Image (cartoon, coloured by chain):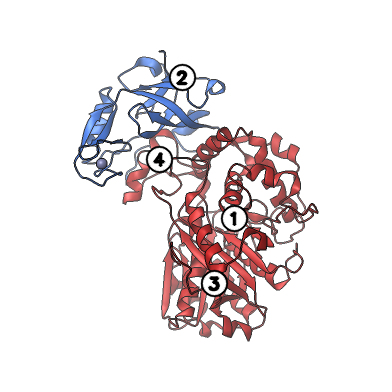
Chain colours: A red, B blue
């Protein structure tokens, strides 16, 4: 993928298998065990065996290295192993890495995985207590003394400026949370299965960091998710309808930082996601009107509105109006809506650093989602927002 | 890495002049000798033209509020003892944007664009009654 011209990766690789552990608040087992279970589940789903795997990709933040997972999962020799940085921003990029490897013949079957005990062990939301000995850690030294140590506090500063710039109130964030929970309510795998919320519930929930309420913030989850990537040709001979990787992109903006990009001109958008969007549209040849459903990274609701704008589903400042009235929900019948996060998202289903959202996109294209969008052909998926990030357009294969 | 509380600056060889000045009541920024632009947070090179001809300069301390958030939840010491507190981004009069906190103001009175002035540990006494003053430069509503 390039900033300037369409790439030649599109359509050459596919997601052929998905697998996850249960999503819980206390898994009762190690992060390595969760990773291995997810990898095995994804291979079973694809109809492949551990010995078929020759590549592994994960996040730099994952505590289970590629070779450790390979040993524990019964995977033999590896010709490709890779990791992507920037927390949840890595999600779709792991699939891009895998697609690059299989499209060029560097590997044949690559498994992407992410597993953690993010609730019962290391909770990101609690905040940073020390700085890393790195240039990133040095930069954090300018924000930590002020108590800007949690993801919610970093996002809230952007959200406040966004709301101010467009004359909006924090209530405009509610439809995002309500849509996620609406979809989670009918998803048995979701933590918030059978527990929908209303706009009034959102308005009544307590402040975490103004303008973010409790119901604007994603869950904390224990679990693992894995995805099997192979060539489109090989995927056609496997068990399920392939989810073709029509376009895959990473993006970083100018003056980008990880969650603390407060020094660039405006704080009303997500320039790094704009970089991703430009590439995905150009390489896929698709437009927002071609997208049947989207999985938009939702660790915090304001960034879902900004993503709708960055991808051109609506204009700058129009995300709130686009999302209002239930237009993000599967039951919307007005014609100008977009079903978003049909699994319940990270607010409703689970916070798996975006990897569970990629699995949902695959289910939509197979026609096997619990909240199925009829005849879904093209799905947009995004990775972590506020950090250098990534995205995918996946399409139903034949 | 250190066991210091998270709100204590950890000066290194490059940032020590900044923190020493702050302890003496002066807010510093960095100005580029090549392109003339000021920046914050301090870097060893100019983030606009990448020149290494960058020097410390005392800031006026005047700023306007760009955005803020009222933090209601933070379980970490020492921040949990200050809840709720106001984290902020301000635009300094010299141009650069700065991460900081706003103290001594009712959060309900804050608005984008309001005039602020720096308050330093031993400088302006605006937060002298604060039992746990932040060891880094913060801002208060400007009295001018
Ligand atoms: Zn310069």
Q: Nearer the viewer, mark 4 or mark 3?
A: 4
Q: Mark 1 highlights which residue?
A: A351
Q: CA distance from mark 1 to mark 2?
A: 37 Å
Across and down, in percent, residue B42 comes to: 29, 38
Do marks 3 and 2 both belong to one polypeptide chain?
A: no
Q: Is residue B61 above or below residue A52?
A: above
Secondary element under disc 1, as helix, strand or loop, is loop
Q: Mark 3 highlights which residue?
A: A36
Q: Is residue A337 above or below residue A235?
A: above
Secondary element under disc 3, as helix, strand or loop, is helix
Do marks 4 and 3 both belong to one polypeptide chain?
A: yes
Q: Nearer the viewer, mark 4 or mark 1?
A: 4
Do marks 3 and 1 both belong to one polypeptide chain?
A: yes
Q: Nearer the viewer, residue B78 or A86?
A: A86
Across and down, in percent, residue A321 comes to: 68, 42
Residue pictured at 68% horizontal, 60% vertical = A293
Quarter of the rendered image showing ligand 1: top left
Q: Quadrant of the C terminus of chain A?
A: bottom right
The answer to whether residue A347 of the structure is visible from this angle is yes
Mark 3 or mark 1: which comes first in sequence? Answer: 3
Direction from residue A154 to residue A311 in the image, left or right: right
Q: Is residue A303 above or below residue A111?
A: above
Across and down, in percent, residue A320 comes to: 65, 42
Q: Which mark is residue B104?
A: 2
Q: Mark 4 highlights which residue?
A: A263
Direction from residue A341 to residue A330 in the image, left or right: right
């Amino acid at each position: 993928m390039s900033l300037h011209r369409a790439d030649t990766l599109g359509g050459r690789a596919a997601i052929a298998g998905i697998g996850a552990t249960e999503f819980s608040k206390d898994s009762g087992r190690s992060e390595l065990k969760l990773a291995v279970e997810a990898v095995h589940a994804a291979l079973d789903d694809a109809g492949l065996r551990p010995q078929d795997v020759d590549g592994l990709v994960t996040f730099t933040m994952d505590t289970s290295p590629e070779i450790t997972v390979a040993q524990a999962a019964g995977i033999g020799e590896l010709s490709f192993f890779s990791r992507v940085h920037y927390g949840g921003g890595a999600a779709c990029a792991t699939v891009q890495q895998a697609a690059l490897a299989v499209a060029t013949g560097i590997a044949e079957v690559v498994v992407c995985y992410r597993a953690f005990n993010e609730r019962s062990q290391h909770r990101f939301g609690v905040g940073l207590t020390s700085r890393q000995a790195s240039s990133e850690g040095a930069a954090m030294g300018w924000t930590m003394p002020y108590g800007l140590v949690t993801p919610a506090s970093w996002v809230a500063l952007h959200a406040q400026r966004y709301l101010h710039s467009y004359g909006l109130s924090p209530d405009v964030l509610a439809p995002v949370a309500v849509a996620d929970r609406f979809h989670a309510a009918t998803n048995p795998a979701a933590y918030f299965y059978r527990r929908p919320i209303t706009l009034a519930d959102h308005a009544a929930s307590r402040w975490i960091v103004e303008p973010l309420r409790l119901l604007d913030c994603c869950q904390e989850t224990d679990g693992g998710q894995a995805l099997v990537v192979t060539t489109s040709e090989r995927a056609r001979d496997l068990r399920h309808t392939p989810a073709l990787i029509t376009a895959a992109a990473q993006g970083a903006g100018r003056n980008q930082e990880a969650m603390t990009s407060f020094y660039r001109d405006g704080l009303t958008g997500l320039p790094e996601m704009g970089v991703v969007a430009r590439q995905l549209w150009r390489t896929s040849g698709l437009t927002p009107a071609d997208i049947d459903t989207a999985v938009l990274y939702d660790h915090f609701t304001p960034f879902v509105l900004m993503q709708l704008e960055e991808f051109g589903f609506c204009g700058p400042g129009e995300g709130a109006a686009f999302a209002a009235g239930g237009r993000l929900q599967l039951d919307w019948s007005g014609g100008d809506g977009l079903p978003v996060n049909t699994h319940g998202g990270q607010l409703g289903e689970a916070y798996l650093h975006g990897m569970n959202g990629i699995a949902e996109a695959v289910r939509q294209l197979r026609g096997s989602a619990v909240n199925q969008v009829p005849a879904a052909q093209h799905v947009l998926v995004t990775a972590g927002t506020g950090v250098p990030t990534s995205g995918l357009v996946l399409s139903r294969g034949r | 890495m250190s066991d210091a509380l998270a709100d204590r600056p950890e000066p290194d060889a490059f940032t020590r002049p900044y923190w020493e000045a702050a302890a003496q009541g002066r807010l510093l920024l960095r100005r580029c000798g090549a392109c003339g632009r000021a920046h914050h947070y301090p870097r060893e090179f100019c983030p606009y033209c990448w020149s290494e001809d960058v020097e410390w300069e005392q800031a006026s301390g005047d700023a306007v509020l760009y955005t803020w958030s009222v933090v209601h939840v933070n379980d970490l010491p020492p921040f949990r003892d200050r809840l709720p507190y106001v984290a902020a981004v301000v635009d300094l009069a010299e141009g650069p944007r700065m991460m900081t906190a706003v103290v001594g103001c009712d959060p309900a009175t804050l608005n984008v664009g309001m005039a602020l002035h720096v308050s330093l540990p031993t400088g302006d006494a605006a937060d002298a009654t604060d039992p746990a003053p932040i060891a880094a430069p913060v801002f208060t509503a400007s009295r001018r």
